[in-house]
Amino acid sequence: MNDWFIRLTDYFPEREMKSRKHFEILFHDKQGIYQLEESKDSVLVYFEMSEFIFIDYILVARNNRRSGRGSRILEQLKQQGKAIILEVEPVSHIDPDSEKRVRFYEKNGFMKMNSIGYERIHMVTNELNKMDVFCWSPVNIPEKLVYDQMKAIYESVHTYKARELYGCNPQPVSEVLWQKQLTYSEV
């Protein structure tokens, strides 16, 4: 296949993408932990640690959506028996697919982590990228644990060798991720 990068850049906005070199370094330096699975109808890039899996990118080809392929990919990951964390763009009227993506994850048992705030400035485009954090777990886990895992993900994946790759220092994790005080209606 080997067109996974083109497929991802065709679908995901630039403010959400890593450079090809960034992917290659992650695949090399974190071999067996940062992984790529590609088929003719899907691309999955994920980071697997002993206690959780982080889905960095999941893409099902447009002509295979609504076929159950995405749910089968998630089911395979769930078989590992670990929490699964991912980032999703908030629902927006500008992007009609955003609501479909959120419904897809909710239908597959993922819950939005309402207490986690996540905003970062892309190191190439300088665009603000706001994301919601979702999690599925075989057992109930506190959002504080997901928050701590997201901090590790940010530093181990998103900003890994960023200075070398992009020529600038990434934002500190304390500026990108925070825990919000929830209102009664959000709990």
Image (cartoon, grey):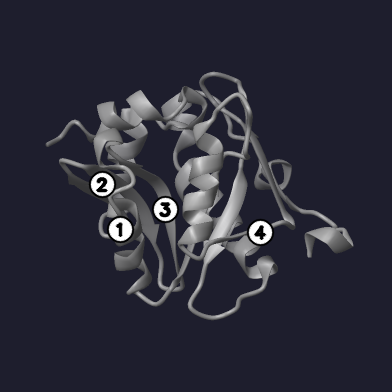
Counting residues from the N terminus, which is met first, the one under dot 1 or under dot 4?
1
Query: Disc 4 marks which residue?
Result: 113
Counting residues from the N terminus, which is met first, the one under dot 2 or under dot 4?
2
The foreground one among 3 and 105 is: 105
On the question of residue 104 being in view, the answer is yes
Residue at mark 3 to residue at mark 1: CA–CA distance: 11 Å
Above or below, 8 against 151 in this view is above
Q: Secondary structure at mark 2?
A: helix
- Amino acid bearing label 1: Ile
**Mark closer to the observer (2, 3):** 3
Residue at mark 2 to residue at mark 3: CA–CA distance: 18 Å
**Mark closer to the observer (2, 1):** 1
- Amino acid bearing label 4: Met
The foreground one among 27 and 111 is: 111
Query: Disc 3 marks which residue?
Result: 55
Residues at badges 3 and 4 in contact (C-beta under 8 Å)?
no
Residue at mark 1 to residue at mark 4: CA–CA distance: 22 Å
Q: Secondary structure at mark 1?
A: helix
10 Å crowding of disc 3: few (<14), some (14-19), many (20+): some
The circle drawn on residue 73 is 1
Above or below, 95 against 66 in this view is above
Residue at mark 2 to residue at mark 4: CA–CA distance: 31 Å
Residue found 74% across the figure and 51% down from its top: 178
- Amino acid bearing label 2: His
